[in-house]
Image: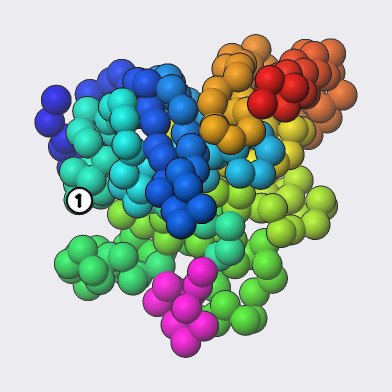
């Protein structure tokens, strides 16, 4: 399977892991971060990973991004190995902290990957304008990060990850440090963004309500060695107002996630 522009591939599995293992070798002995992980993520899905700290959620995301090298099994991204997918610009990555350069304006931060990739000046301007509009930050191009709230900084970070139009967005607890009110609003905005762009989302969280609210599929992971203890396909509709969290379906899914986390802890 060959990648096309921005790392795109034909319809089908965007990410596929088979018997994936990762062991870190340290002075204190081996650390088994991932063990026998099997997972397929289809194009356009919103997949959340939830589990206790140290269970391998972020490690799996870093493997997809080509930032960690598995020690066993196989992993493909758009039909390519993760390192080749990275070179093909197959994904954008949003970290826990916004990671914006304080000496660059918001527009300058968004332009950074475009400069590295060699886009023309006209194309850079267009992409900055379009991605700022996508995350509702029109008019903030010439502001500096310190002039924006924490939630606005995270939206700018998402805009930067979207700027080169990768089909896959990797998000590592991007809203974890925000208060609940801001987090709720950004969850709504992220769902709207996902609906408008059709991108495939891989999202790491520690919050059960956040995982249930956002996802078409929830991957529940057990403590180290990180294994998948349950994969839950959500029956919730694609359009989800916040009050859907009071519905019976939402409560039932949250209960199943909680039970999966408990079972994983007991089996560890």
Which is more toward the observer, 266 or 120? 266
Q: Secondary structure at mark 1?
A: helix
In percent of the image, x 22 and y 36: which residue is there?
81
Please state the horizontal and vertical placement of residue 200, each as a whole percent of the image. Answer: 43, 33
Instruction: Check if residue 102 falls in the magenta segment.
Output: yes
User: Up-down: is 187 above or below 221?
Assistant: below
Q: Quadrant of residue 228?
A: top right
Image height of 222 relative to 32, above or below = above
**Residue 197 placed where, x, y %?**
44, 38
How many neighbours does mark 1 have within 10 angstroms: few (below 14), some (14-19), or many (20 or more)? few
Between 103 and 219, the one lying in front of the other is 219
Up the image or down, 202 lies above or below 244; here it is below
Query: Taken as a whole, is the magenta stretch helix, strand or loop?
Result: loop
Where is mark 1, residue-wise? 87
Q: Furthest residue to the right? A: 246
Residue at x-position 63% and y-position 64%: 152
As drawn, is 181 to the left or to the right of 151? right
What range is drawn magenta here?
Answer: 99-109
Is 76 within the magenta? no
In the picture, which quadrant includes the C terminus?
A: top right
Judged left or right of residue 221, residue 41 is: left
Q: Quadrant of residue 146?
A: bottom right
Residue at (37% x, 42% y) in the render: 63
Q: Is residue 15 above or below residue 180?
A: above
């Amino acid at each position: 399977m060959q990648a096309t522009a921005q790392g795109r591939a034909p319809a089908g599995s965007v990410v596929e892991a088979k018997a994936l293992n990762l062991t870190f070798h340290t002075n204190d002995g081996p650390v088994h971060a991932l063990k026998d992980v099997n997972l397929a993520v289809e194009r356009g899905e919103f997949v959340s990973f939830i589990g206790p700290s140290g269970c391998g959620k972020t490690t799996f995301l870093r493997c997809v991004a080509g930032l960690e090298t598995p020690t066993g099994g196989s992993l493909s991204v758009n039909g390519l190995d993760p390192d080749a997918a990275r070179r093909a610009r197959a994904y954008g990555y949003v970290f826990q902290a916004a990671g914006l350069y304080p000496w660059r304006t918001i527009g300058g931060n968004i332009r950074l990957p475009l400069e590295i990739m060699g886009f023309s000046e006209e194309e850079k301007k267009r992409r900055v304008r379009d991605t700022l509009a996508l995350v509702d930050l029109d008019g903030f191009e010439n502001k500096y990060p310190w002039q924006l709230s924490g939630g606005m900084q995270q939206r700018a970070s998402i805009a930067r990850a979207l700027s080169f139009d990768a089909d896959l967005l990797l998000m590592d607890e991007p809203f974890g440090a925000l208060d609940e009110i801001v987090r709720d609003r950004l969850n709504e905005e992220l769902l709207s963004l996902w609906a408008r762009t059709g991108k495939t989302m891989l999202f790491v969280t520690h919050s059960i309500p956040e995982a249930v609210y956002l996802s078409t599929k929830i991957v529940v992971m057990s403590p180290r060695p990180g294994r998948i203890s349950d994969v839950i396909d959500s029956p919730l509709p694609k359009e989800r107002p916040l009050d859907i969290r009071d519905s019976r379906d939402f409560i039932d899914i949250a209960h199943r996630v909680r039970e999966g986390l408990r079972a994983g802890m007991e089996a560890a």
